[in-house]
Amino acid sequence: MVSRYKVLGINDDKTYCQCCGRNGLKSVVWIEDTETDEVKHFGSTCALSPKHGFDVDKEIKEAIKSEKDRLQAVWSLMLKEYKAQGGKMIQDQEMDRYGIMQYVGSSRVANMTAYLACESIVLAKFPHLVNYFKKD
């Protein structure tokens, strides 16, 4: 039996859910009703909710994982380029209870402006990634 609903993908074109109205979403799931050809976007919670009867949970979870993997690859390319351009990483410090400075957490980019400037270099090398650097 073919499902009535089809997962078209996940992206950040919209930041709100058409079901519950929640705003500020990092990404939305696009679902097509194949009987009416209507396409709507939902937050992952609403898209996975059994009450909507989409019955495409496996496809949604695969799309979420795929999107996370792609975004991680893009940011990894930017970090690699940032380091190739001489960019440095720093680690946050905080005072422990004995008054000694300790490194905490993971290292982070020292100059976010320079890191984000690597975007144009990465795009020149990998033009097929242009959709991952959309600006509204």
Image (cartoon, helix red, strand yellow):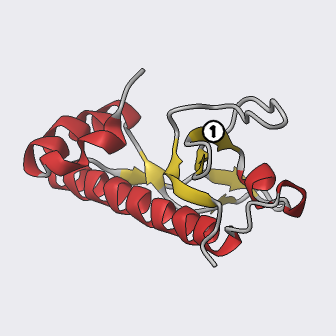
Q: Assign a secondary structure to mark 1.
A: strand
Residue 73 relative to residue 40: left or right: left
Q: Pinpoint residue 90: horizontal percent, then vertical percent.
A: 45, 52
Q: Nearer the viewer, residue 106 or 117?
A: 117
Can you say which quadrant of the picture contains the N terminus? bottom right
Farthest left residue?
125
Can you say which quadrant of the picture contains the C terminus? top left
Q: Would you place residue 55 above or below residue 7 in this image?
A: below
Residue 59 relative to residue 43: left or right: left
Farthest bottom residue?
1
| Residue 13 seen by the camera | yes
Q: Would you place residue 26 above or below residue 92 in this image?
A: above
| Residue 104 seen by the camera | no
Q: Would you place residue 40 above or below residue 97 in this image?
A: above
Q: Which residue is mark 1?
A: 40
Residue type of the residue flagged with mark 1? Lys
Residue drawn at point x = 58 percent, y = 40 percent: 39
Q: Nearer the viewer, residue 109 or 123?
A: 123
Residue drawn at point x = 35 percent, y = 32 percent: 134
Q: Pinpoint residue 105: horizontal percent, then vertical percent.
A: 63, 62
Residue drawn at point x = 16 percent, y = 55 percent: 84
* Quarter residue 62 falls in: bottom right
